[in-house]
Image (cartoon, rainbow, N blue to C red):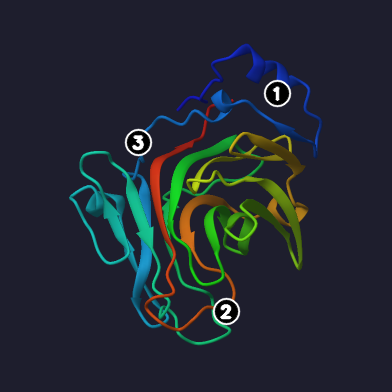
Amino acid sequence: MTISRFTCVTCLSLGLTLALTGIAILPACAMDVSSRPQTSGLTLQEPQARLKLRLVPGSTLATGYHSAFYFQDTTTGAVTLQTDGLQPSIRGQTAPATVLREGHAWYAQQTPAIMNASLRIDTWPADQRVIIGRIQSANGPVVELVADGKRSQVIALVHDGSRTRHITAGTIFPDRRISYEISSNPSGALQTVVNGTRSILPMPPAATTPAMWFEAVSGQTGWHMPCHHDIARVTFTALDIQHPVQ
């Protein structure tokens, strides 16, 4: 796989001026994500029953699989992920989420890793906070992007063991559309680009040992209303995961 290249000189010049832990505003060309969602190498994780999960491999998704939690438009390729407020329904448990999970794990020191996505928030849950993407490890999330409808912002939650850092990663367009990139580099840099706003941070030390993978998510946070109407619904119009050779 190859890294997508910016198509304007302005994008390149801005990228060269960024310092570690810096934040920069990029022109629209920097988030030109044109590829249809690629689901063949992904595994769908969706609710099956209360506190249980179903895993659906990419080979099954390719046959036209759909459920109450997953649907792919055969014409556009857009993928819709939806939660159900009753899954699970026990207060204090993990909030409901439907996930497209990368099929192969990788190590931060091993290879550059990039996930690009474009999406629209179709339905906000009661608290208007939706997890839309993350780097996950066996020890838990490394970084999560959370869309906050009340503030029209995307927040990056960077987890380092017991500590979590909150960063405003970008704004949400009025039509609820978001384009984002999450990337990791063996140099130790962790980067997010959300609707043209770029943030570069150090990879959390606790995340450098375990294997990691990308996840595209429609997920709720914290306590949620235990009813079918409290849902999160996200449609991904583009999704691409790359592991370029150094």
Disc 2 is placed on an element classified as loop
Q: Position of residue 137 (x, y in %)?
A: 58, 58
Residue at the location (51% across, 34% down)? 243
Q: Position of residue 10 (x, y in %)?
A: 66, 16
What crowding class fits label 1: few (fewer than 14 Cα within 10 Å), some (14-19), or many (20 or more)?
some
* Amino acid at pointer 1: Gly
Q: Quadrant of the C terminus?
A: top right
Name the residue beneath numbered marker 2.
Answer: 223
Name the residue beneath numbered marker 1.
Answer: 15
* Amino acid at pointer 2: Trp
Horizontal side, residue 223 vs residue 46: left or right: right
Q: Position of residue 149 (x, y in %)?
A: 57, 58
Name the residue beneath numbered marker 3.
Answer: 36
Foreground mark, 1 or 2, reads 2
Distance of mark 1 from mark 3, alpha carbons? 26 Å
Distance of mark 1 from mark 2, alpha carbons? 39 Å
Q: What is the tally of numbered marks visible in this picture?
A: 3
* Amino acid at pointer 3: Arg
Distance of mark 2 from mark 3, alpha carbons? 33 Å
